[in-house]
Amino acid sequence: MTPKQRINHITKWIKSYATRNKIGTLVVGVSGGIDSAVVSTLCARTGIHTMAVSMPIRQSKHTHELSVKHAYWLTTQFDNAENYTVDLTPTFKQFEKATGDLFDNELAFANSRSRLRMMTLYQIAQTTGGIVVGTGNKVEDFGVGFFTKYGDGGVDISPIGDCMKTDVWDMGRELGVMPEIIDAAPTDGLWADGRTDEDQLGMSYPDLERMMSLDLLKRAAIVDSQMPGSHKLSADDRWKLKRYQELRARNSHKMQAIPVCIMPKE
């Protein structure tokens, strides 16, 4: 599909879901990144009341400015769009104070930021008769599980969950998203040092997408000797495939249903 076709298909899908379920508001957390910029714009294109919410928690000035700029741009393009900023830094500080002495863990606190944002979006959604719209793409949500369980993974619908990151960039250009957002290094905005997604994942999104395709072939029981060009994989690609598989294995619990203890039949 072309970017324009994807845009039209997703816009119709969101509108159809909202109409069928009598949803009056679409609530999207905007981070200053391309995924949330594209999703919030797709939501606004439906004509349904769209709320773009920026939720800084000790955010870098540049990242927060991008989220605010995009949210403002959205309201200038669509009459049905509103933008809000909810500063969660004071709330997060209190959470750190209450838990940090006994449970001081950097990764846990990073994920807690995401979960605090999820709570905020649902507070807004329930107050306005709306739903929380997810911003995760295919390689993040169903490839390596690069999201926070019950954080940015806690959503009602996932409009770009079947789109690769490169597809999202292409849609952003077609939609007229600000170039500085399209060109910005992807980041989840959960770390004080401002580390990027590539810093955490160990490779770029185009590389992740290639490794996802290779891994799907392997998991489809196509042995290495039968994989087209598999014997020509460079040492670098072999490392990247191994890294992808390690990330996927580590995060597989996020992509599966919650285990339920089934009671035996009497």
Image (tube, rainbow, N blue to C red):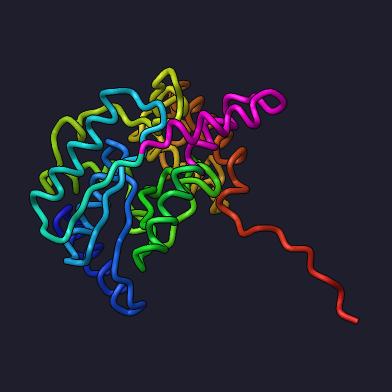
How far across and how far down the image is residue 100, in percent? 64, 26
The quadrant of the rendering that contains the N terminus is bottom left
How far across and how far down the image is residue 254, in percent? 57, 48
| Residue occupying image coordinates x 56% and y 45% | 223
How far across and how far down the image is residue 10, in percent? 25, 62
Residue nearer the viewer, 151 or 223: 151
How far across and how far down the image is residue 190, in percent? 45, 30
The residue sitting at the top extreme is: 193
| Residue occupying image coordinates x 23% and y 41% | 169
Q: Is residue 92 magenta?
A: yes
| 26 over 173 or under it: above or below | below
| 119 over 214 or under it: above or below | below
| Residue occupying image coordinates x 55% and y 46% | 149
Q: Is residue 34 left or right of residue 233?
A: left
Looking at the rendered structure, the number of numbered marks drawn on it comes to 0
Region rendered in magenta: 87-115
Residue nearer the viewer, 256 or 21: 21
Q: Is residue 50 magenta?
A: no
Q: Main secondary structure of the magenta part?
A: helix
The quadrant of the rendering that contains the C terminus is bottom right
Quadrant in which residue 191 is drawn = top left
The residue sitting at the right extreme is: 266
| Residue occupying image coordinates x 38% and y 40% | 209
Residue nearer the viewer, 36 or 60: 60
Q: Is residue 253 left or right of residue 24?
A: right
Q: Is residue 222 left or right of residue 228?
A: right
